[in-house]
Image: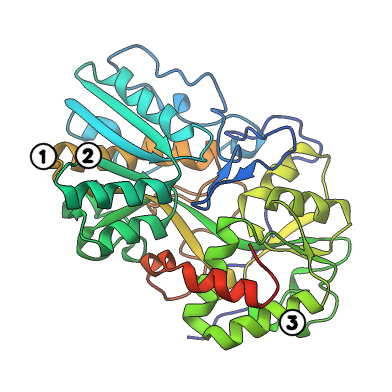
């Protein structure tokens, strides 16, 4: 089906008032502004903060949606989210051991703390570490018959895919994942996405228009006017992007693309928040970054000249997810299913969308700030689990002189 070029590529943040100084909901940045990268592809300090006091209201009671929603101009006037409210879900009762991927700034732990406030008979013991490390541990424990975790909450699909590929999981129930689009779930109900992040192209609106950005990322090396550009090869998100390109275009084309972009003068930066800031400064005309960094820059400045474009159907349009998996041998399968249903509740999806600007995984909760909906994006048709095969990607990046 032929799509209009502007479908799914509309301008961002038109609802944010110029000069707003309100703190972006859910964004706590490190002093350097961009956080640090971890081996599993997370960006420490970029998805945290609670955008409020984190209070769950009266103990034992489910509060109104305002207790979950972040603060700031960008979320003002949002409609009441649809989906399934927590009140309509079975109660959580019992204890869970959760291996949770590090790098989300504590926002997921905050939500679990709220659940513990609501349910006096429910408790969570969480162990935070890079998702890739947890994935390896889960597989090793399963092989040894010494399962210690009930839930694996990863910040990327590749780690979920690794555990699934090794068979160290139990399928989630159909009811647990029924609201999530199939492309954001693992085969055999292995895992379910709970929050998404999209690759995007931040660009300086004083230098470029949306029409200047090609629909295909493969056209970037030959497109005049995009440079100076920036990328952050050490970021896990960038490595996943390159992996997706390998899967779609093949190793030779990907190597050639990396070499051509480097030859064109694409500048290396430590993280994607800095890239987005440099775009807003005019030091860069464009760059490669996850979608939420431009929003954070927008909030911190008085109407900066930055906007986002999205490519279509290629690696540049990759949508990755944080997701949950039921660990093999948990012995608490029903409780895990109910827990995952809570992560996909109206309140949880509003929490993630307005405090870290993640993409909601259920269609009845809208993304913030005028972003295109998840259905309006055009991600590539690949199995996200295949992003776990990073070895060839790192070798290829080294060969191209763009080592991560």
Check if mark 1's residue and mark 2's residue have beta carbons within 8 Å: yes
- Which quadrant would residue 114 be assigned to in this image? top left
Instruction: Give whichever of discs 1 and 2 has the lower sequence position.
Output: 2
- From this viewpoint, is residue 128 visible? yes
The residue at which mark 2 appears reads as 150
Q: Quadrant of the C terminus?
A: bottom right
- Give residue 26's position: percent from left, percent from top: 57, 33
Which label's residue is closer to the chain start, 1 or 3?
3
- Comes first in the chain, label 2 or label 3: 2
Residue at (67%, 47%) from the top-left corner? 295
Mark 1: secondary structure: loop
| Front residue (pair 84, 359) | 359
Q: In the image, which disc is placed on residue 401?
A: none
Residue 185, compared with residue 331, is above or below; it is: below
Give the CA distance from mark 1 to mark 2: 8 Å
Q: Would you place residue 145 above or below residue 312 in this image?
A: above
**Residue that label 1 marks:** 331
The residue at 29%/37% (across/down) is 342
Work out whether residue 172 can be spotted: no
Mark 3: give few (<14), some (14-19) or many (20+) Cα within 10 Å: some
Q: Using the numbered discs, state the Cα–Cα distance from disc 2 to disc 3 in whole angstroms.
A: 46 Å
Alpha carbon separation for disc pair 1 and 3: 52 Å
Per the image, label 2 sits on a secondary structure element best described as loop
Give the secondary structure at mark 3: helix
The residue located at (67%, 77%) in the rendering is 400
- According to the picture, the residue beneath numbered tag 3 turns out to be 260
| Colour scheme employed for the rendering of this structure | rainbow
Please provide percent x and percent y for residue 54. 48, 21
């Amino acid at each position: 089906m032929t799509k209009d070029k502007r479908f799914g590529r509309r301008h961002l943040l038109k609802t944010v008032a110029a000069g707003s100084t309100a703190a972006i909901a859910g964004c706590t940045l490190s002093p350097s502004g961009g956080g640090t990268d971890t081996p599993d592809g997370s960006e420490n300090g970029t998805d945290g903060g609670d955008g409020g006091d984190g209070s769950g209201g009266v103990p034992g009671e489910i509060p109104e949606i305002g207790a979950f929603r972040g603060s700031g101009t960008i979320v003002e006037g949002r409609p009441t989210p649809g989906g399934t409210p927590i009140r309509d879900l079975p109660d959580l009762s019992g204890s869970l051991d959760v291996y949770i991927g590090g790098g989300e700034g504590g926002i997921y732990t905050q939500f679990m703390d709220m659940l513990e406030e609501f349910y006096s008979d429910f408790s969570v013991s969480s162990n935070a570490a890079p998702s890739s490390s947890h994935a390896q541990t889960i597989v090793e424990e399963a092989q040894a018959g010494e399962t210690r975790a009930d839930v694996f909450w990863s910040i990327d699909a590749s780690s979920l895919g690794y555990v699934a590929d090794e068979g160290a999981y139990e399928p989630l129930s159909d009811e647990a994942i029924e609201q999530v689009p199939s492309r954001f779930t693992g085969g055999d109900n292995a895992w379910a996405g709970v929050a998404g992040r999209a690759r995007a192209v931040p660009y300086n609106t004083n230098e470029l228009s949306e029409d200047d950005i090609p629909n295909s990322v493969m056209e970037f090396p030959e497109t005049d006017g995009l440079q100076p550009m920036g990328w952050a090869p050490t970021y896990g998100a960038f490595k996943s992007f390159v992996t997706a390109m390998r899967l779609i275009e093949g190793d030779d084309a990907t190597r050639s693309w990396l070499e051509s972009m480097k030859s064109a003068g694409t500048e290396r930066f430590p993280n994607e928040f800095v890239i987005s800031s440099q775009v807003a400064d005019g030091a860069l005309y464009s760059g490669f970054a996850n979608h939420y960094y431009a929003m954070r820059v927008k909030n911190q400045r008085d109407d900066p000249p930055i906007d986002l474009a999205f490519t279509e159907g290629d690696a540049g349009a990759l949508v990755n997810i944080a997701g949950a998996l039921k660990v093999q041998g948990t012995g608490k399968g029903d409780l895990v299913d109910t827990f995952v249903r809570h992560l996909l509740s109206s309140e949880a999806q509003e929490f993630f969308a307005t405090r870290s600007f993640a993409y909601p995984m259920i269609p009845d909760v809208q993304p913030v700030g005028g972003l295109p909906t998840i259905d309006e994006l055009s991600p590539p048709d690949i199995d996200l689990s295949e992003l776990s095969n990073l070895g060839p990607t790192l070798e290829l990046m080294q060969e191209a002189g763009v080592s991560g």
